[in-house]
Image: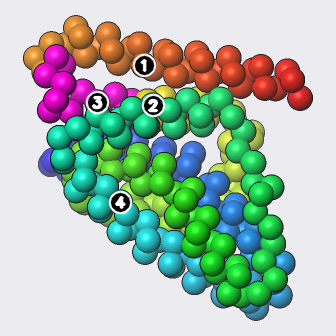
Amino acid sequence: MDWTSPQFWSGLFSIVIIDLVLAGDNAIVIGLSARGLERRLQRKAVWWGTFGAVAIRTLLTFAAVYLLKIPGLLGIGGAILVWIAYKLLAENRDHGGFKEARTFGEALRTILIADTVMGLDNVLAVAGAAHGNYVLVVLGLLISVPIVVWGSTAVMRLVDRFPLLIYVGSAVLAHTAVSMIESEPLFPVFRGNEAAAWLFYAAVLLAVLFLGHLRRERAAAAR
């Protein structure tokens, strides 16, 4: 993929949006895990926890890019990403299950485990948006690191102030998911059939946004 091509910049834009709407949650967990420590240990836990989390995420993302080349896995990954797009819009994430750590080792362990588990959606989404381009993967990771380390509070405030960003994020995830499914070698129906591809794209996008919005409104009304 040529860096001057629209596909490259579209992929990079998708990765930036994905990181903004998904990586912020991981940063909040890092902050919560280290909050109970003294100031000196807080910074140490956040630094080493973030370093370890980024290293793990890098390995997982490169592994995901490789695995998505296996026939069948691109379609499965796309289907999972459709569900992630819906869940992002339909549910408000709860960070209350993560308790403050009492020691540096406990905080570091919590950060690494939480970021690995919570970052799987980010890994899959970035790998799918990169379409096998490792340069895009690296750029995506370079963008997500500052978000995880410094930008968590700003990102969450931005999302709270502009709820439309959640819809944009869900739409980008749905777009990435459809692109993955339509690129699946086992689904030849989409190759050379623009009508079928656009119909499928519109159906998935509208379903994610409509059903996610409906679930979000019902959850808000029930509170």
Tell me, for residue 204, which label it has, or none: 1
Q: Earlier in the sequence, mark 3 or mark 4?
A: 4
Residue located beneath label 4 in the image: 61
The amino acid marked with disc number 3 is Ile
The prevailing secondary structure element of the residues shown in magenta is helix
Q: Earlier in the sequence, mark 4 or mark 1?
A: 4
Q: Residues within 10 Å of mark 1 (few under 14, many from 20)?
A: some
User: Which residue appears at 33% of the width and 44% of the height?
Assistant: 129
Q: Horizontal and vertical percent for residue 149?
A: 60, 70
Note whether 41 is above or below 163 in the view shown. Answer: below
Note whether 148 is above or below 66 in the view shown. Answer: below
Q: Earlier in the sequence, mark 3 or mark 2?
A: 2
Tell me the distance, in whole angstroms, between the alpha carbons under discs 2 and 4.
Answer: 18 Å
Tell me the distance, in whole angstroms, between the alpha carbons under discs 1 and 3.
Answer: 11 Å
Tell me the distance, in whole angstroms, between the alpha carbons under discs 3 and 2.
Answer: 10 Å
Note whether 5 is above or below 56 in the view shown. Answer: above
| Callouts 3 and 4 close, C-beta under 8 Å | no
181 drawn magenta: yes
Tell me the distance, in whole angstroms, between the alpha carbons under discs 2 and 1.
Answer: 8 Å
Residue located beneath label 2 in the image: 82
Give the left or right position of residue 212, taking residue 169 as reference.
Answer: right
| Callouts 2 and 1 close, C-beta under 8 Å | yes
User: Residue lying farthest left?
Assistant: 192
42 drawn magenta: no
**Extent of the magenta region:** 175-190
Tell me the distance, in whole angstroms, between the alpha carbons under discs 4 and 1.
Answer: 25 Å
Q: Nearer the viewer, residue 110 or 170?
A: 110
The amino acid marked with disc number 2 is Val
Q: Horizontal and vertical percent for residue 51?
A: 51, 79
Residue located beneath label 3 in the image: 181
User: Which residue appears at 69% of the width and 34% of the height?
Assistant: 91
